[in-house]
Amino acid sequence: MASSASKHLFSFVLLLSLFHFSSAARSLAETSDESQQPILFQYHNGPLLTGKISINLIWYGKFKPSQRAIVSDFITSLSSSSPSPSKNQPSVATWWKFIEKYYHLANAKKTSSLSLSLSTQILDESYSMGKSLSQTHIKKLAAKGSQSNAINVVLTSSDVLIDGFCSSKCGTHGSSTSSLIRGKSTKFAYIWVGNSETQCPGQCAWPFHQPIYGPQSPPLVAPNNDVGLDGMIINLASLLAGTVTNPFGNGFYQGPKEAPLEAASACPGVYGKGAYPGYPGDLLVDATTGASYNANGLNGKKYLLPALFDPSTSTCSTLV
């Protein structure tokens, strides 16, 4: 049974309208009902992503090289075996290592391993599918990356409109059928995250922007001095955790399959100890820039990463 503390966390979704959604959009009405009736986090006996998985980035629209570096350094920082891993703790790799708990629970008799690495980056700066996209367009863009042992991440710039963006989600993850590989087709996982800086930073880039709903507090300074990209990192991190632990809709989640709460989205608005509605928790603050963060990455980068739900204790685990 979930603890009283974890029950309290479910109210964040309604109070703050922080839409860190996974494979399906969640409405405020749905969240309100579920916040009163917390559902036990469950494993639904499906496969988790295992082995060596390449992460391919599909950049759609205009992104500065410095913005692309924020994301690529984050992906590389996930692996503790990456070149020159950050010696500063807490680190992105330490945050990601917590995901191993899910693998132990899913396969107690045999240890399954997962290794992520940054692979191909595809630039589509000409808006080949226009500036107003549906989820069908997102799938087509995701299919441009490798479809074997890969997660294809579509990142859309701030001037691209996406069906459901801001009104119900900040990003999605799902799976699609690949083209024929060695005579047969398989499923591949994909993620989409949008840059909310000009469209809905109060929903998708909190706590680096004033929230639209709920308790009002001053926004925090973004660790990479880019509200849109730092917000994208929060959502990308959440969706990556959901993707590997629930890639095909039958892994770890709670609630209805059509609108599941997953490894990170089950802890909305929680980034440090002491978090409550309108307050992200006690975070680290950079002495020079005043930026708030909870994880160190490669090349001196700092990030704010969401808490991860611990299915064995029904609590949200934070780095700080």
Image (cartoon, rainbow, N blue to C red):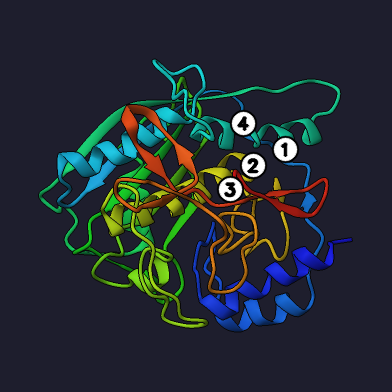
Q: CA distance from mark 4 to mark 3?
A: 14 Å
Q: Could you tell me if residue 40 is visible in this image?
A: yes
Q: Amino acid at mark 2?
A: Thr
Q: Amino acid at mark 3?
A: Gly
Q: Are marks 2 and 4 in contact (CB under 8 Å)?
A: no
Please state which of the two labelled residues, at mark 1 or mark 2, is closer to the viewer. Answer: 1
Camera-nearest residue between 238 and 282:
282
Q: Is residue 139 above or below residue 135?
A: above
* Residue that lies at the very extreme toward the front in this rendered image: 287
Q: Which residue is mark 3?
A: 242
- Residue at 50% x, 70% y: name it: 18
Q: Which residue is mark 2?
A: 245
Is residue 66 found left or right of 142 in the rendered image? left
Q: Are marks 1 and 2 in contact (CB under 8 Å)?
A: yes
* Residue that lies at the very extreme toward the left in this rendered image: 126
Q: Amino acid at mark 4?
A: Lys
Is residue 187 found left or right of 55 in the rendered image? right
Helix, strand or loop for disc 3: helix
Q: Earlier in the sequence, mark 2 or mark 4?
A: 4
Q: Is residue 190 above or below residue 134?
A: above
Q: How many numbered discs, if any?
A: 4
Q: Is residue 111 above or below residue 197?
A: above
- Residue at 63% x, 79% y: name it: 30
Q: CA distance from mark 3 to mark 2?
A: 5 Å
Helix, strand or loop for disc 4: helix
Q: Could you tell me if residue 145 is visible in this image?
A: no
Q: Earlier in the sequence, mark 4 or mark 3?
A: 4
Q: CA distance from mark 2 to mark 4?
A: 13 Å
Is residue 176 found left or right of 61 in the rendered image? right
